[in-house]
């Protein structure tokens, strides 16, 4: 195997590993957002709330739901994609051999685009989660301050 082929194989493995890491981070953040939504709902039922607290808290919940939507979209399987299992499931044995003998750099480029799209969705969801959490915290402060 030449140095170029080794480099391409390493790059291909690195891109696939990055997709896996991003999907893992996305799953963890999705669980966290779900827990925050459930916890905020529970706390909101027990706090004496005023109209501004409801408004800010509702906006915070909406932002967290938007973050969850971004996370779900990020990990949604692309069954029409060119990479991975769906592709292999549609090909014959001869077509798989031909596909594997094609240029590895094209596969790296395609997988890299997938990885960047997933990472961008994750980054936006993290930003929304932070904003939603801040709004929920503000709603609690308004509720506690308004009750005093």
Image (cartoon, rainbow, N blue to C red):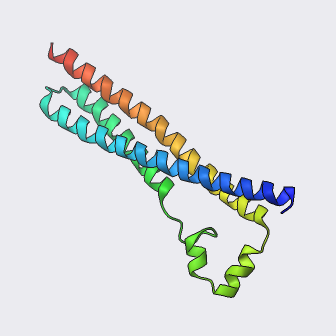
Which quadrant: the N terminus? Answer: bottom right
Identify the image quadrant of the C terminus.
top left
Q: Is residue 107 left or right of residue 34?
A: right
Q: Residue furthest front?
A: 1
Q: Nearer the viewer, residue 26 or 104?
A: 104
Q: How many marks?
A: 0
Residue 54 in which image quadrant: top left
> Residue at point 72% right, 59% down?
108
Please give left or right for residue 44 compared with residue 15 in the image. Answer: left
In this rendering, is residue 50 above or below 69? Answer: above
Report the side of 100 relative to 23 (left or right).
right
- Locate residue 65, reporting x and y percent: 36, 45
Report whether 49 appears left or right of 8: left
Which residue: 36% across, 40% down?
32
Q: Residue furthest top?
A: 148
Please name the residue shown 26% across and 19% down the image: 141
The answer to which quarter of the image holds residue 41 is top left
Of residues 110 and 2, the one drawn nearer to the viewer in this rendering: 2
The residue drawn where x is 66% and y is 53% is 15
Counting from the top left corner in percent of width and height, residue 76 is at 48, 60
From what the image shows, is residue 52 above or below residue 89?
above
Above or below for 101 versus 108: below
User: Percent position (x, y) of residue 94?
Assistant: 70, 87
Q: Quadrant of residue 43?
A: top left
């Amino acid at each position: 195997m030449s140095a170029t082929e080794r480099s391409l194989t390493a790059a291909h493995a690195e891109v696939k590993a990055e997709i896996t890491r991003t999907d893992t981070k996305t799953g963890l953040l999705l669980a966290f957002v779900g827990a925050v939504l459930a916890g905020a709902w529970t706390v909101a039922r027990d706090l004496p709330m005023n109209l501004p607290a409801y408004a800010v808290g509702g906006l915070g919940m909406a932002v967290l739901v938007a973050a969850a939507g971004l996370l779900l979209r990020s990990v949604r399987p692309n069954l029409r994609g060119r990479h991975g299992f769906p592709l292999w499931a549609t090909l014959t044995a001869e077509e798989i051999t031909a596909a594997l003998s094609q240029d590895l750099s094209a596969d790296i480029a395609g997988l890299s685009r997938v990885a960047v799209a997933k990472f961008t969705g994750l980054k936006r969801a993290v930003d929304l989660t932070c904003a939603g959490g801040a709004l929920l915290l503000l709603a609690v402060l308004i509720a506690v301050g308004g009750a005093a």
